[in-house]
Image (spheres, helix red, strand yellow):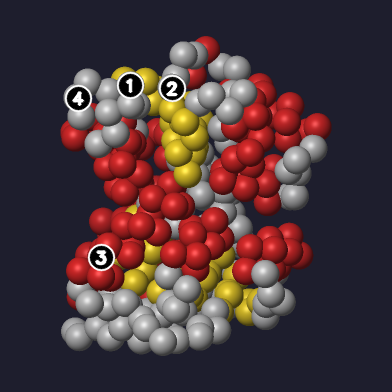
Amino acid sequence: MELSSTQPIGIFDSGVGGLTVALAVKNLLPEEKIIYFGDTAHLPYGDKSSEIVRQYSLQIADFLLEKNCKVILIACNTASAAAYEAVRKHVGNKAIVLNVIDPASEYVANNKKFKKIGVIGTKGTILSNSYTIKIKEQSEDKEVVSLATPLLVPMIEEGFVYDDISNAIIKNYLSDDTLKNIDSLILACTHYPIIKNQIRKFYGFKTNIIDSSEVVARKLQSILLQKELLNKNNVPEHEFYVSDYTEFFKTIAEMFFDDEIILNKVDITK
């Protein structure tokens, strides 16, 4: 199937987290139209079975294909670990399929200054061991330690950021002995860049905090350049869809995109 540069980029996540990826894509590729889907009815994905995450991901992929997307970007680490291969196979040549784990792993593996790397994410992402496996495949000498931080996604989705509650939860997790003496930390959940400054502050701004959203946006730009699919001379009107309406989603989306947005509710299970 022949893809066209004028087709939009589809991005999906369980909720607001993937908006960090969407923002990075918008900033790097301002002429690309983004169609975003937040599966707010089923969040968080991190405590769901891999099978159900795959099911949701395939349903969302079909929705984004109906919207004629040239790219389907899985902006969720849990779904990237559980469903990337299934989505790639299902989509075939109808769109380019990207995940958020591979670009971040490649970036860390190829950076010589990172020796002991911490990874924080949902239970699903950490249990998959995806980051450790992919980093070690490319750079055996790296030490990788992982910690599940399951309260962070619901905390962020409920709007607890930049306050005493979120600071206490963040401190509790990051003080865990597992993460002792790390020189870098991968935010292995696209929700976490929303609290990136709180995390940086905990480490006294001395630890490298790796925000996969920026790395993924650069990877997408590289692929679109290579395939001559970059949209040019376009003033895009982005579209936002959710499986369940939440006021916090709208607030974050409008803050990130610096504009009032229309939020469309869609049932992907039909």
Query: Considering only order in the chain, which callout, 4 or 3, is on the residue closer to the N terminus?
Result: 4
Which residue has dot 1 on it?
115
Q: Are marks 3 and 4 in contact (CB under 8 Å)?
A: no
Instruction: Give the residue type at disc 2.
Output: Asp
Q: CA distance from mark 3 to mark 4?
A: 27 Å
The residue positioned 43% from the left and 77% from the top of the image is: 32
Of marks 3 and 4, the one in the foreground: 3
Q: Nearer the viewer, residue 261 or 152?
A: 261
Which residue has dot 4 on it?
140
Relative to residue 231, is residue 243 drawn left or right?
right
Residue 124 in percent (x, y) is at 45, 40
The residue positioned 38% from the left and 64% from the top of the image is: 73
Up the image or down, 7 lies above or below 13; here it is below
Which residue has dot 3 on it?
223
Q: Are marks 2 and 1 in contact (CB under 8 Å)?
A: yes
Query: Considering only order in the chain, which callout, 4 or 2, is on the residue closer to the N terminus?
Result: 4
Q: Nearer the viewer, residue 260 or 50?
A: 260
The quadrant in which the N terminus is found is bottom left
Q: CA distance from mark 2 to mark 1?
A: 7 Å
Q: Which mark, by number, is residue 183?
A: 2
